Image (cartoon, helix red, strand yellow):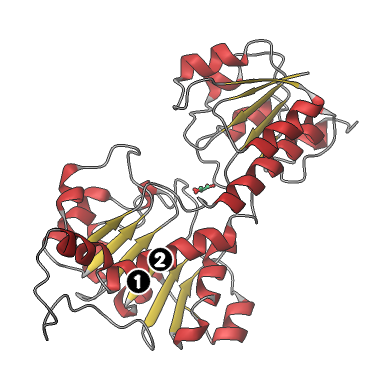
């Protein structure tokens, strides 16, 4: 069988795939266009794609031979799951292995903004440091503050649990009660409005869906404290970026830490000019260990799927209700 890989991923995953199948990898280290993906998929049985690839109806239906899509990401909002399901094609993702890594980045962003780390580093490199001063680069404490978590799935829960050393008051929103957080941290489930009004730091951990698109808009930003910090390591379009730029430049809130953007990789110039935002290039899962595990998981799912089994991280298991497993 043959697999098309849309961009080079860590070698252990490619080695695993190569033991079983003939693989073709995009030779250039860049995002392919839709047309290039379709061309690369020609005659292939499997597609290993990334979160930057638009895997829509046109792509999914382009190759009649296609039997399996393994995505090298946990989020799969870039894939038309309904079409894949209709075509009987299982789609897998890479959950679990990037949970702690992404939660760690959210904490890194929180400290970067509270203690103005990037701004301070730039200040020193510009030769502006003239010695200790009582009012120099004052930031904010983290300990004993209120942490608001929007969405307590795997990553939101891991992010909350890492607050243990800082004795924080935890508020969260979710459809269900998160009993682990309530038991271990005394966390309280509240409405989004209450969370925004009362939290010192707000961190987003929901997937991008129709319901979460622009979940944080002007109205929500206005509810936040003037001293509040907003973190987003989930997906860019959950925040209305134009409203956020306004909120940051007019100081409705203290700052923001972002790993994701509304029109990635395009980032508005106004955002890059602001001092009270720390910008990270979508590296939530970006450690050597985690990216290697993601490559292995994507390869394992592809192997099982192409051999007719149910991939362990299949996100559309409905396809197997119609199709007998091998
Ligand atoms: C994912 O896998 O969905 C993350 O956004 C990667 O950082």
For disc 1, does the CB lie below 8 Å from ligand 1? no
Quadrant for residue 197, please give it: bottom left
Question: What residue is drawn where x is 20% and y is 67%?
Answer: 120
The quadrant in which the C terminus is found is: top right
Is 166 placed above or below 93 here?
below
- Percent position of residue 240, x then y: 28, 50
Crowd around label 1: few <14 · some 14–19 · many ≥20 (10 Å): some
Is 3 placed above or below 209 here?
above
Is 139 placed above or below 106 here?
below
Question: What residue is drawn where x is 24% and y is 59%?
Answer: 277
- Percent position of residue 185, x then y: 55, 85
Q: Secondary structure at mark 1?
A: helix
- Percent position of residue 312, x then y: 77, 45
Residue bearing the label numbered 1: 111
Q: Are marks 1 and 2 in contact (CB under 8 Å)?
A: yes
- Decide if residue 124 is on the left or right side of residue 199: left
- Percent position of residue 237, x then y: 36, 46
The Cα–Cα distance between marks 1 and 2, rounded to whole angstroms, is 5 Å
Q: Secondary structure at mark 2?
A: helix
């Amino acid at each position: 069988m043959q697999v098309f890989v849309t961009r080079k991923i860590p070698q252990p995953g490619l080695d695993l795939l190569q033991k079983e199948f003939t693989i073709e990898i995009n030779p250039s280290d860049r995002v392919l266009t839709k047309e290039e993906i379709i061309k690369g998929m020609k005659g292939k049985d499997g597609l290993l794609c990334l979160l930057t690839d638009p895997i829509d109806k046109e792509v999914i239906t382009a190759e009649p031979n296609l039997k399996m899509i393994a995505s090298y990401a946990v989020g799969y909002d870039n894939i038309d799951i309904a079409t894949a399901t209709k075509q009987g094609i299982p789609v897998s993702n890479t959950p679990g292995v990037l949970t702690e890594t992404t939660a760690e980045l959210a904490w890194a962003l929180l400290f970067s903004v509270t203690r103005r780390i990037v701004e301070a580093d730039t200040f020193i490199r510009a030769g502006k440091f003239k010695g200790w001063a009582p009012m120099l680069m004052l930031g904010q404490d983290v300990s004993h503050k209120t942490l608001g978590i929007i969405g307590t799935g795997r990553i939101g829960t891991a992010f909350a649990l890492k607050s243990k050393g800082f004795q924080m008051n935890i508020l969260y929103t979710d459809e269900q009660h998160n009993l682990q957080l309530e038991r271990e941290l005394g966390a309280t489930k509240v409405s989004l409005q209450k969370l925004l009004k009362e939290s010192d730091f707000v961190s987003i951990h929901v997937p991008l869906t129709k319901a979460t698109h622009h979940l944080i808009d002007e109205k929500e930003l206005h509810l936040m404290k003037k001293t509040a910090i907003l973190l987003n390591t989930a997906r860019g379009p959950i925040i209305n970026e134009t409203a956020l730029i306004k909120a940051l430049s007019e100081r409705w809130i203290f700052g923001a830490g972002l790993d994701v953007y509304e029109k990635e990789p395009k980032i508005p110039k106004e955002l890059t000019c602001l001092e009270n935002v720390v910008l990270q290039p979508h590296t939530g899962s970006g450690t050597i260990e985690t990216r290697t595990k993601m490559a292995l998981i994507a390869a394992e799912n592809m192997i099982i799927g192409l051999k007719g089994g149910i991939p362990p991280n299949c996100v559309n298991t409905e396809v197997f209700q119609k199709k007998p497993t091998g």
